[in-house]
Image (tube, rainbow, N blue to C red):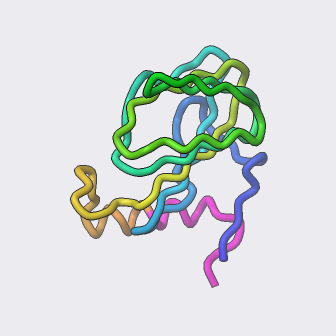
Amino acid sequence: MKSWDLGGLNLKPRLPEILSSSDDARVIALDLAAGETLEEHEVHERAFLLVLVGEIEVTGNGAEIRGGRGLLVEIEPRERHRVEATADARLLLLLTPWPGAGHPGALELREKLYTRRHAAKRSDVAEG
């Protein structure tokens, strides 16, 4: 079992921090200052974006969703979308499955090991 104090993470602005990575999923924390944007892009996985602090606007596929703390947005694989922080925001992103068969960014075995070890260092409780 692992846990994280998401409010206590010392994140660098706009630099995603991988908290956990496995064959099934990847969990990423990200801080965006008010007015900062993740320009239109897509990911190959299903993405769940949770607002922990602040407010965001997500646009894509002809829709616009705005919200603050507690907002959860589900984004389909390969769905083009844009995220803007309308107030300083801390986001939690869950990508699943990771990396999945045929994923263009599939990691080599040694790269997976490095990523998992790095993510384990961010956990409050080591695996038992």
Q: Residue drawn at (55%, 47%), measured in percent from left and top?
A: 48
Camera-side residue: 125 or 82? 82
Q: Return the x and y of residue 107 as percentages of the image width and height.
A: 28, 59
* Residue at the limit of the structure toward the top, as seen here: 35
State the image quarter where residue 32 is shown.
Answer: top right
Magenta range is 116-128
Q: Residue at x 75, y 31 (%)?
A: 68
Residue 59 point in image, percent of width and height: 52, 24
Residue 76 position (above or below residue 98): above
Give the tally of numbered discs.
Answer: 0
Task: Describe residue 10's horizontal placement relative to residue 110 as left or right.
Answer: right
Looking at the image, residue 23 lies above or below residue 19: below
Q: Position of residue 39 (x, y in %)?
A: 44, 22
Q: Residue at x 58, y 63 (%)?
A: 121
Closer-to-camera residue (23/77): 77
Q: Is residue 118 magenta?
A: yes
Q: Is residue 33 above or below residue 16?
A: above
Quick one: 90 or 126, which is closer to the camera?
90
Q: Please state the horizontal and vertical placement of residue 91, each as a whole percent of the image.
A: 64, 39
Return the residue found at the far front.
62
Quick one: quadrant of the N terminus?
Answer: bottom right
Residue 23 shown in magenta: no
Q: Quadrant of residue 108?
A: bottom left
Q: Quadrant of the C terminus?
A: bottom right
